[in-house]
Image: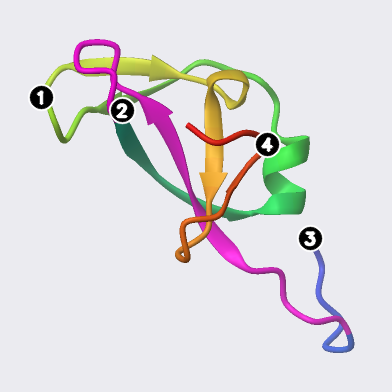
Amino acid sequence: MLRTGKEPESAMAMIYTICPTTGRSISTGVETDAETFATMPDVISRVICSICGQTHNWSRHNSVLREHNGRSWPKAM
């Protein structure tokens, strides 16, 4: 996304997915804004789980964007 300095900056937020072992929400370590998240290709990525230590696959389809204030989209996990 190009910035001209005239638009307000989009809020950055962290992408979260679910640990299939524990069912708990985990951070992927990827931070982005809502517009970029909505247009990301739905490709498989990997994350080392901070809860169980295993490597899990995730994609935009099975993840949410969570702002630092706890608000999530496209759906709450």
Q: Which residue is mark 1?
A: 53
Q: Which residue is mark 2?
A: 47
What SS does tag 1 mark? Answer: loop
Q: Is 67 within the magenta?
A: no
Q: Are marks 4 and 3 in contact (CB under 8 Å)?
A: no
Picture disc at residue 62: none
What SS does tag 3 mark? Answer: loop
Q: Say which amino acid is labelled 3.
A: Met
Mark 2 surroundings within 10 Å by alpha-carbon count, few (fewer than 14), some (14 through 19), many (20 or more)? some
Q: Which residue is mark 3?
A: 1
The answer to whether residue 31 is above or below residue 12 is above
What SS does tag 2 mark? Answer: strand
Residue 37 appears in which quarter of the rendering?
A: top right
Picture disc at residue 74: 4
Q: Are marks 4 and 1 in contact (CB under 8 Å)?
A: no
Q: Which residues are magenta?
A: 7-24
Q: Say which amino acid is labelled 1.
A: Gly
